[in-house]
Image (cartoon, helix red, strand yellow):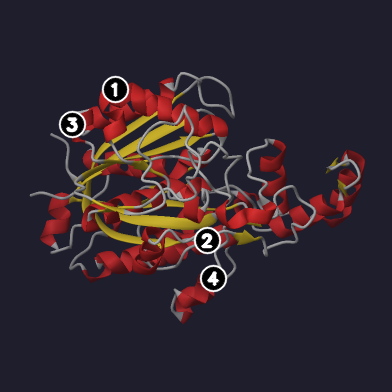
């Protein structure tokens, strides 16, 4: 029998707040973290708004000696360090007597990008041809050759956040980073859970971080027509499952959880927030940026996670949807949910917190799993905001526009990433 895995600490840095209770309160109130972009001048871009983390300073989370060591990290690694410190403190792992840190590891879904990305994007902006609304390859090559500062291979590596977290807490166990786009942190948590189950670690710091609110990131998603362009009504631009949805809103942040083997947590008297009981991971093997039109990968991941949990679909009380707000994603995710839950699909509440905090890309799944754990704690379901126009192809209960009080014991959380990655977690209220 595999070992049981529980959650003993949580922390996040999001566009809606930097602590659990403030952010959760704003989610339940249906508040939006979307506004005009300020990180860079987006005035000439098709999408001029985003969900930024405001007023963030790493020194607010680390004590002076710690900050001095990590103060030069990238923006997203800073989010990761801050969220990990919040989760570590919440778990009181540091206070555990005789904690064997060789048995504590890190598994992140961390985003790509060198620490010198500001120079890279500055060169891209200077190489942009505004008349053709496209990148002038000749001008770009000329600018890049003279302005772009080269960084070391290590600085460009997405695993740097995982390395900094290990250094911050002195944990010497397994250390991994996965970059499977929007599914990354859900996959990281699932894989970290399996590592604890099979005895490779007693505890794991797991979650994700990402920041793509820069000219290169926005340009890429605009060229894919994946972003909403509601510049005049950006506060309500993120509208998952609504018939008028026109793309997702780019967000940023980090979400971190402390996962722990049950007996290890009990031995130190840890508070147990929830239990991770199921994980499923599949690939569509279809197109790089499209979900298979039959939802086969999502269906397989959800079924795998539910079976792994030893449950049946009727045991699921709430689904935290990937719910990006793009036409295809929401339609196919709805189809996939119907494929798993059958006639009962319309009776299972489904919502997307991306309607309020935007799409945090690699960090999305971890933050959404935290909302599931809080939903279980408080018996409150977060709403899908800006749901005003029902879509015939999206015909489920999306908890529209207002939170809902109901009994919540078991939640399923979906994350689907570019490349055809599908990952699902099942989390339940802890029962001895």
Residue on which the image places disc 3: 311
Which quadrant of the figure contains the N terminus? top left
User: Observer-nearest residue: 418 or 105?
Assistant: 418
Residue on which the image places disc 1: 342
User: Observer-nearest residue: 324 or 367?
Assistant: 324
Mark 1 surroundings within 10 Å by alpha-carbon count, few (fewer than 14), some (14 through 19), many (20 or more): few
For the residues marked 2 and 1, what is the alpha-carbon distance in whole angstroms? 34 Å
Q: Secondary structure at mark 1?
A: helix
Picture layout, residue 407 above or below residue 265: above
Residue on which the image places disc 4: 56
Residue on which the image places disc 2: 33
Residue 34, image x and y in percent? 57, 58
For the point 37% across and 67% down, the residue is: 86
Q: Secondary structure at mark 2?
A: loop
Residue 13, image x and y in percent? 46, 63
Residue 131, image x and y in percent? 91, 45
Q: Secondary structure at mark 4?
A: loop
């Amino acid at each position: 029998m595999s070992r049981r895995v529980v959650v003993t600490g949580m922390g996040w840095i999001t566009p809606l707040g930097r602590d659990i209770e403030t952010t959760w309160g704003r989610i339940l109130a249906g508040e939006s973290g979307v506004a005009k972009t300020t990180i860079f001048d987006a005035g000439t871009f098709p999408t001029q708004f985003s969900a930024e983390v405001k007023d963030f300073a790493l020194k607010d989370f680390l004590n002076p000696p710690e900050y001095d060591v990590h103060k030069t990290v990238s923006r997203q690694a800073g989010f990761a360090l801050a969220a990990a410190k919040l989760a570590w403190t919440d778990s009181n792992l540091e206070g555990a007597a005789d904690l064997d840190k060789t048995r504590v590891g890190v598994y992140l879904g961390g985003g790509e990008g060198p620490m010198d990305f500001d120079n890279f994007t500055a060169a891209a902006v200077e190489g942009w041809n505004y008349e053709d609304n496209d990148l002038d390859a000749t001008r770009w090559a000329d600018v890049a050759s003279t302005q772009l500062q080269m960084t070391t291979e290590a600085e460009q590596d997405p695993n740097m956040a995982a390395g900094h977290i290990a250094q911050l807490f002195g944990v010497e166990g397994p250390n991994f980073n996965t970059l499977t786009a929007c599914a990354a942190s859900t996959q990281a948590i699932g894989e970290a859970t399996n590592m604890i189950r099979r005895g490779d670690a007693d505890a794991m710091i797991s979650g994700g971080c990402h920041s793509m609110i820069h000219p290169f990131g926005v340009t890429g998603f605009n060229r894919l027509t994946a972003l909403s362009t509601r510049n005049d009504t950006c506060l309500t631009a993120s509208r998952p499952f609504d018939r008028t949805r026109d793309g997702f809103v780019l967000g940023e942040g980090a979400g971190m959880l402390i996962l722990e083997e049950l007996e290890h947590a009990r031995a130190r008297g840890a508070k147990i927030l929830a239990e991770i009981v199921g994980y499923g991971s599949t690939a569509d093997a279809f197109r790089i940026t499209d979900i298979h039109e039959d939802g086969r990968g999502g269906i397989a991941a959800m079924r795998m996670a539910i079976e792994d949990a030893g449950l049946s679909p009727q045991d699921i009380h709430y689904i935290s949807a990937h719910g990006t707000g793009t036409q295809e994603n929401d339609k196919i995710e709805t189809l996939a949910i119907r494929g798993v839950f059958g006639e009962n699909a319309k009776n299972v509440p489904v919502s997307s917190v991306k309607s309020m905090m935007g799409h945090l890309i690699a960090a999305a799944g971890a933050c959404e799993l935290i909302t599931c754990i809080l939903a279980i704690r408080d018996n409150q379901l977060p709403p899908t905001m800006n749901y005003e126009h029902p879509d015939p192809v999206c015909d489920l209960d999306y908890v529209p526009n207002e939170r809902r009080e109901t009994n919540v014991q078991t939640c399923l959380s979906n994350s689907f990433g570019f490349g055809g990655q599908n990952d699902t977690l099942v989390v339940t209220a802890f029962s001895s």
